[in-house]
Image (cartoon, rainbow, N blue to C red):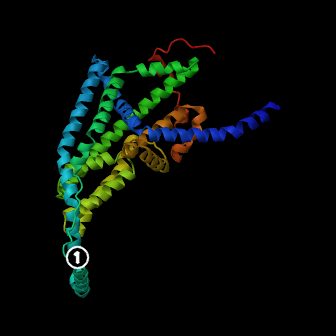
Amino acid sequence: MTSMPVREHARSPSSGPMLALLLIALVAVLHGAADLLVPIAFSLLLNLLLSPLVKALKRIGIPPALSAGVLVTTIVSLVIFAAGGLAGPAERWINEAPQSIREFQKQTFAAQDQLSGITELAKEVDELASSEAPANTQEVVVKGPGVLTSVAGRLPSIAAYTGIVIFLTFFLLASGDTLLRRMTRCGRTWTERRRIVSIARQVQSDLSRYLGTVTVVNLFLGAVVALAMHFLEVPNPLLWGAVAGLFNFAPYVGALATALLLTVVGITTFDSLADALLVPMSFIALTIVEGQLITPAVLGRRLSVHPLIVFLSIILWGWLWGVAGALMAVPIITSLKVVADHVPRLNIVAGFIRREDNAGGASGKKHKNCKSYQSNLPLGPPVDT
């Protein structure tokens, strides 16, 4: 009876500072090793997205290595084709946007006739200031590099990241369940190995379903936005549809950034303020329908995360890994939620992450498929402790 208070008293002073030090060290490692961890994390997400296709092709007799090579090659070709087709219009718009904004300001604030007196006074002040300046003063204009020039300067790092993602994704897809079988060796007992298999399979299943659903929804949203921009006669509608679909992987923040960008697009495209605002308003209407009706109906509530946690996760991972971290924030927090659902000591973390109306839905189902997961993998004999 006397040992319990002594044990708690001896553990409590060191557990708090130790946990804080571990968290600080983890954040420092994630931030410092971002150049290495970002392509690895992106490869893992691509593996989760494409692994169901590899398994489906394996069931009809196609080897995983062959299907993985075909999938990776197809995706790389599509990305190169899309980037090549959209890079030119994007650079032209970025170079022409400042001049278009200045012209819009001149047309919008055309009430300068009523302020002619003030304008004349300002001109006189300018002439007085210019008369006192040296006659041989030259104006220096510094022109920054274009978009393609800036990208060309980063080609070595981009090529390195791309190579890591391509080859790591291929090897992960081609290896199948090899990595999972090796992970089960971390368990010392049969129960621990079953739990490892259950957690890994559930994470893989849930994230594959989530990533597949979100990818299809975002492709559909990008296509609808591009169609809306075409009907509104906005130049380069495919570019803005691609931007809307890509940014939508980061909830809330991505939609806000797209709305602000399309506001600038509308201002630089149309002379009328009403026509200019119609561009972002159409996107806002489409993204409200997608976020409030389509995605919840297709994805369901089982993987739902509290909106505040999603927003904080996007901010945190965006600070750690930049734009790539913001786009991968939701899959990362979803992975943490699934793992916490299966580990009893982390159930309080799962309850903190998930929505209130889903507080008791996942914990009661967390081990229902454990036997089916177990039968698919040769776990080996249990190790006695």
The C terminus: image quadrant: top right
Rendering quarter of residue 249: top left
Q: Amino acid at mark 1?
A: Pro
- Residue under pointer 1: 134
Sort mark 1 into few (<14), some (14-19) or many (20+) by Cα contacts within 10 Å.
few
Task: Looking at the picture, tell me which residue is in the foreground, 288 or 248.
Answer: 248
Compared to 217, does 108 lie above or below? below
Tell me if 276 is positioned left or right of 324 in this view.
Answer: left
Residue 195, image x, y percentages = 54, 24
Residue 313, image x, y percentages = 46, 46
Badge 1 marks a residue whose secondary structure is: loop
Q: Residue at x 47, y 27 (%)?
A: 200
Compared to 258, does 381 lie above or below? above
Rendering quarter of residue 344: top right
Tell me if 162 is positioned left or right of 363 in this view.
Answer: left
Q: Residue at x 26, y 85 (%)?
A: 118
Compared to 327, does 287 lie above or below? below
